[in-house]
Amino acid sequence: EVQLVESGGGLVQPGGSLRLSCVASGFPFEDYAIGWFRQAPGKEREGVSCILNTRIDYAESVKGRFTASRDNAKNTVYLQMNNLKPEDTAVYYCAVGGYGLLPYEYTYWGQGTQVTVSS
């Protein structure tokens, strides 16, 4: 059974940082891309980052601020988020089964973790 569990969300002030984690199980982790997505209230889910081996793609809105990485030994993907802005407020999800930044490409999803950027 494929499982993805996100953690690391919380409340942070503008300009602050958070690191999200996504722990995966139930599939050969190192062979698959992991996508990060987010969904703000009233908005569609959007792609944030996709990481497969050394290839990492980012949405334009987060380039230079967010960094994705993975530890295949721990079946974990991270999303380091720096210089956070109020518009980054959303539920963040990790997903597997696809590639790129389009949500419909992916099959399996975690439950999400809330990130709130506010003073």
Image: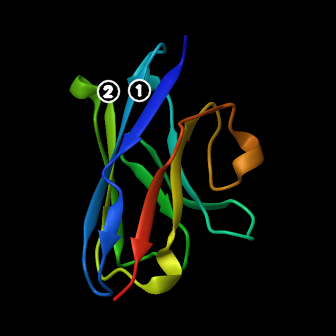
Mark 1 and mark 2 in contact? Answer it, CB < 8 Å.
yes
**Residue 14 versus residue 83: which sits nearer the camera?**
14
Q: Residue at x 33, y 62 (%)?
A: 10
Residue 42 at what x, y percent from top left?
74, 70
Residue 100 at what x, y percent from top left?
62, 51
**Three-letter amino acid code at disc 1?**
Ala
Query: Element type at marker 1?
Result: strand
Residue 44 at what x, y percent from top left?
75, 64
**Three-letter amino acid code at disc 2?**
Asn
For the C terminus, give its image quadrant: bottom left
Q: Residue at x 53, y 36 (%)?
A: 110
Q: Quadrant of residue 7?
A: top left
For the N terminus, give its image quadrant: top right
- Placement of 6 over or under 26, stated as above or below: below
Query: Element type at marker 2?
Result: loop
Residue identifier under label 2? 75
User: What colour scheme has been applied to the protein in the rendered image?
Assistant: rainbow
**Residue 99 versus residue 44: which sits nearer the camera?**
44
Residue 88 at what x, y percent from top left?
48, 76
Looking at the image, residue 115 sits to the left or right of residue 11; the answer is right
Q: Residue at x 69, y 59 (%)?
A: 45
- Sequence-wise, the earlier of marks 1 and 2 is 1
Residue identifier under label 1? 24
Looking at the image, residue 73 sits to the left or right of residue 111; the answer is left
Looking at the image, residue 14 sits to the left or right of residue 98; the answer is left
Q: Residues within 10 Å of mark 2 (few under 14, many from 20)?
A: some
Q: Residues within 10 Å of mark 1 (few under 14, many from 20)?
A: many
Q: Quadrant of residue 14?
A: bottom left
| Alpha carbon separation for disc pair 1 and 2 | 5 Å
Q: How many marks?
A: 2
Q: Residue at x 54, y 39 (%)?
A: 111
